[in-house]
Image: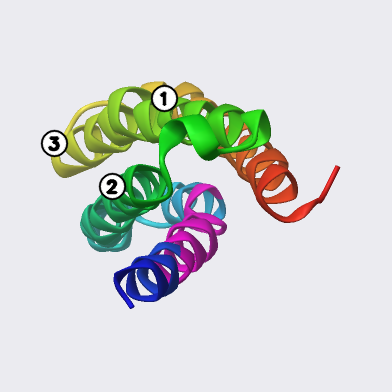
Amino acid sequence: MLNQVLLIVHVMAAMLWFGGAAFAPRQLREALAMPREQARVLTAGVLSRGGVLGISATLVLLTGVGLALIRGFGNLHPRFHTALLLTLIWWALGLFVVRPAVKKIVDIVAGDGDLAPTQALAKRVGMMSGIMHALFTVTVVLMLWRL
């Protein structure tokens, strides 16, 4: 029973994380093209949704570890170990690269200075989001594909 509950939470959190993060780079680019007042509201919205994504990302990681513990790490196929490592990598990218860049964008837009530095930050967010989504896709393939 616990195994099924963890698996359901794991899959639902992964869907929320993947789907919720899919459009954040585009929303940032569109917000930065708008007048500053609108950009303030929209970039702050992206940052606040990032908090929900962080919670779902952490749930994916914790439920994945929980499922591995229930089943026994030694009993798992090596592809699950690889998938867990990839999940840890894209969780860390989100926490230590993407979120600080979005926070910096929000801080710059909230001020009265030049918005030029936000373009490079938005490109970084887009690039890292693409890498994270590619890692997510590989992770899903590892989880579902029977070798």
Q: Out of 65 and 93, give the one closest to the viewer.
A: 65
Q: Secondary structure at mark 1?
A: helix
Q: Residues within 10 Å of mark 1 (few under 14, many from 20)?
A: few
The majority secondary structure of the magenta stretch comes to: helix
Residue at mark 1 to residue at mark 2: CA–CA distance: 38 Å
Nearer the observer: mark 2 or 3; the answer is 2
Nearer the observer: mark 1 or 2; the answer is 2
Q: Position of residue 73 (x, y in %)?
A: 44, 34
Q: Which mark is residue 62?
A: 2
Q: Which residues are magenta?
A: 11-25
**Amino acid found under the numbered disc labelled 2:** Leu
Q: Is residue 110 visible?
A: yes
Q: Out of 105 and 68, give the one closest to the viewer.
A: 68
Q: Residues within 10 Å of mark 2 (few under 14, many from 20)?
A: some
Looking at the image, tell me whether mark 1 or mark 2 is earlier in sequence order.
2
Quadrant for the N terminus, please: bottom left
Q: Residue at x 41, y 40 (%)?
A: 72
Circle 3 sits on which residue?
111
